[in-house]
Image (tube, rainbow, N blue to C red):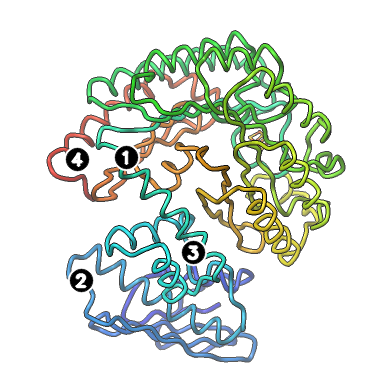
Amino acid sequence: MDIRLVGHDYKYGVEQIMLLMFPEQRPVYVDRDAPESADFVRSELSPDGRRAVTLLFVGGKSAEGEAELPAPPPSEPLLRDRECQKLVKLAFFRAAVALTGRQPPWGALTGIRPGKLAERYMRETGASEREAVEFMQREYYLTPRSASLCARVAEEAETLRKSFSPEDISVYAGIPFCPTRCAYCSFVSQSVEKSFALIEPYLEALIKEIRAAGRITRELGLRAVSLYVGGGTPTTLSAPQLERLLGELGEQFGGSALRELTVEAGRPDTIDRERLAAISRGGAGRISINPQTMNDAVLAAIGRKHSGLAVVESFRLARECFSGDINMDLIAGLPGDCPESFAASLDEVIALAPENITVHTLAMKRGSRLISENAALPTGGDVSQMLDYASEALTSAGYSPYYLYRQKFSSGGFENIGWTKPGHTGIYNICVMEELHSVLALGAGGVTKLTDPTTGYLERISNKKYPKEYIESIDEICDNKYRMREFYAKMREGGARA
Ligand code: SF4
């Protein structure tokens, strides 16, 4: 699609709406005087930044969209950019809806954290949950369901935010190994078969990084409120290895402020009595057992080597050996699945009564086997039915949504939602998704996000991606932790900003 920008250069915003409404198109920027082509968009912003107009021609049809600010945009450059870009996106979105008649479930919202927007609105204006719902529908064209979800999770985040102090952080430790590779996975995780020899040196390196992070955390007077051991599949570690890892995390971060320690047991085929005992002794209060589906044919199609029955057995074993909360993940939109089979999977999981159930929507990620094999998938309409069923069934079983995020290229443009029984919210999930404070991410592929909760300013420190290079660079990775000094010095002087 030819794109002509007049009076602005918000290419990113324009491309986001193009991807949302015309995913088959690719952007080609043309000069403002170039002749009109078959498919083109002309996006204009007025010189005072208050009004945007988009003219759209696609497939022989045309439409126009407008958006206007009630007052001139703020003069501060970052805030001005935010408002003007929003205006340009809205005008394009309105034109695209008029032309296609299509109303995406998340309206004009393109970000992965829709709850953050509602939460900021509630915080800055003192609006109630109901007012936030109206705001999201009016300003961003969210469907009533999406707007209610957004406001619900925003309310949860706001409650949690108020309970934190500026010294609070969360810590993630990643184990990038799995028994086999799932078809939809684009993560750096390596199958145990191929990388067994790396596990022990990886653990050694990770413990080194945990110690370095612990030292700098104490030096800066920070306190961990939540710890999360994720992956990959942390339970590919043996019971003694898990015990060492959790012991070290407890040693470095297990102060009185710690409210939650989660271990992703992840794949049911890695769960046994010894590992569960090690996890319990390590102080975890929450684990995750993630079947993704209970349908054996779908499990086989995604590369899992266990059955639905094995999930039930693992869950029962966990209930016997572990007294904390259990989360279970399902994915809507997997290859070979259909609304009826998804509903049956969900019913089976609900019958087990875990404290949390997370319902993801399949995302087609580059690097995954699903993309390379061009697998046949349920339609967007099917996925919509699956999610509608999930909403109804989980609500009537006493669960409510507590965190939410979206992913690029997710089936039908839908979302991932964490559901919880009352009083069992996973703190770490909310902190990460709503960026409530800094999250130190340790291990291969970890991206630490240093966040100033007052200004929202964020700085990243990335670790090496693959286990082998992570092990080789561990000293440099530990040294990088000292960048936290500079960030917190700025934050304490009155706010870290760009
Ligand atoms: S369990 Fe998760 S990280 Fe491991 S292969 Fe499957 S999707 Fe990837």
Q: Nearer the viewer, mark 4 or mark 1?
A: 1
Relative horizontal placement of residue 309, taking residue 151 as reference (left or right): right
Q: Residue at x 76, y 46 (%)?
A: 347
The residue pinned by badge 2 equals 74
Relative horizontal placement of residue 56, taking residue 46 as reference (left or right): right
Dot 3: element? loop
The quadrant holding residue 207 is: top left
Look at the picture and state if 76 lies above or below 165: below
Q: N-terminal of the two: label 1 or label 3?
A: 3
Is residue 453 or residue 465 the one in the foreground? 453
The span from disc 4 to disc 1 (Cα, nearest Å) is: 19 Å
Residue 225 is labelled as: none
Q: Nearer the viewer, mark 2 or mark 1?
A: 1
The quadrant holding residue 325 is: top right
Callout 4 touching callout 2 (CB < 8 Å): no
- For badge 3, the amino acid type reads Thr
Disc 3: CA contacts within 10 A as few (<14), some (14-19) or many (>=20): some
Q: Residue at x 60, y 73 (%)?
A: 22
The residue pinned by badge 4 equals 491
Callout 4 touching callout 1 (CB < 8 Å): no
Callout 3 touching callout 2 (CB < 8 Å): no
Is residue 461 or residue 468 the one in the foreground? 461
- For badge 4, the amino acid type reads Met
* Residue 226 x/y as whole percent: 42, 30
The span from disc 2 to disc 1 (Cα, nearest Å) is: 31 Å
The span from disc 4 to disc 2 (Cα, nearest Å) is: 24 Å
Relative horizontal placement of residue 450, taking residue 426 as reference (left or right): left
* Residue 274 x/y as whole percent: 67, 11
The residue pinned by badge 1 equals 163
